[in-house]
Image: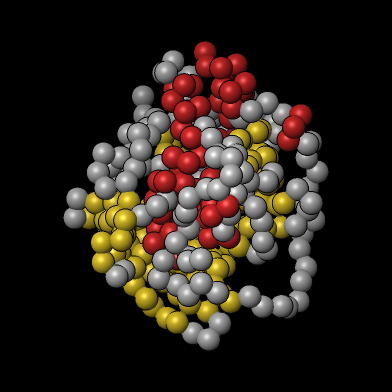
Amino acid sequence: MTNDGTGAGAGQAPPSALLDLVGLLDLERIDRDIFRGQSRPAVVPRVFGGQVAAQALVAAFRTVPDDRLAHSLHAYFLRPGDPAAPIVYTVDRIRDGRSFTTRRVVAVQHGQPIFHLSASFQTGEDGLEHQEPMPAAPAPETLPDSTELLPRHAHLFSDPGVAGRLAEARAAVDLRYVTEPPYATAGQPREPRSQVWFRTAGKLDGDLDRPVLHLCLAAYISDMSLLEPVLLAHGRGGWTVGDVVGASLDHAMWFHRPFRVDEWLLYDQSSPTSQAGRGLGHGRIFTADGRLAITVMQEGVVRVPRG
């Protein structure tokens, strides 16, 4: 088994949307530390940030010894990605230590860097342990999935075709909101907190069941909803409603404990501040049995459209 983050499934095949997403992370190696990835049509006319983050993490993993997993990543979104063009990922082998390995990845399109990631990897180790308790949340099975939620609110979207495109883009992920998403309560300021349950829309069995793939898919999904608490604080519905414009600026993740992305994970999100056209999102991802698996932070541009 190698740290390439991809592989063919065994036994019952996962749904095609999940296989397509896994295939998206299967980068082509064009030199020792240079990889090429493709994109798929996006809901908005740029590459989804979670995709480029996950692909960059895959590229880094392919240069790291098999006994090491990512424990943190820090990334900057520099330019919008073009969904119609391939993305080239160049990996710098910054350090290979006894316990830790560091990699830097630059994603390039049309001769310009669009994304920069630094990631650190560690061998398994025992140590002191504590964590914050998992917040209360209803069981995910009691909540509507995207196929129920999006059609219910499609009349609110500025473009009537958005609901279908968004459902297609998220078909590989079963994402369930604990409370109403921002677009459902536009115009009504709320506490800047939200919770979603998520898992892949199918099991990762056989050769797909490798820790690297779980980590990279979590990176992909972590960018889907983290800035929504910023919108909630100001009663904004988001880009689907058309009352804000924005984009991710940076993204950081810390991987604390083992998890499976094909089992329910609770994404507890909040926004401590927004100012100067920027908003900050903070997320904690818990396993269903209460273990804090991942911490996420993201800052993004959040602007009110000029009339």
Q: Where is residue 141 in the image (x, y as percent from the top left)?
A: 74, 32
Kindly identify the residue that appears in the image at 19 percent across and 55 percent down: 111
Above/below status of 37 relative to 2: above
Kindly identify the residue that appears in the image at 58 percent across and 44 percent down: 11
Kindly identify the residue that appears in the image at 53 percent across and 35 percent down: 15
Q: Where is residue 246 in the image (x, y as percent from the top left)?
A: 42, 39
Q: Residue lying at the far left in this picture: please name it.
A: 111
Judge by depth and name the residue closer to the eye, 88 or 304: 88
**Residue 272 in sight from this viewpoint:** no
Q: Position of residue 222 (x, y in %)?
A: 55, 48
Quadrant hosting residue 305:
top left
Q: Residue lying at the far bottom in this picture: please name it.
A: 98
Q: In this view, does 45 lie to the left or right of 95?
A: left
Report the number of numbered marks. 0
Above/below status of 265 relative to 154: below
Q: Position of residue 98 (x, y in %)?
A: 53, 86
Judge by depth and name the residue closer to the eye, 170 or 181: 170
Q: Residue lying at the far top in this picture: please name it.
A: 155
Quadrant in which the C terminus is drawn: top left
Judge by depth and name the residue closer to the eye, 61 or 291: 61
Q: In this view, does 89 lie to the left or right of 265?
A: left
Q: How is the image coloured?
A: secondary structure
**Residue 65 in sight from this viewpoint:** yes
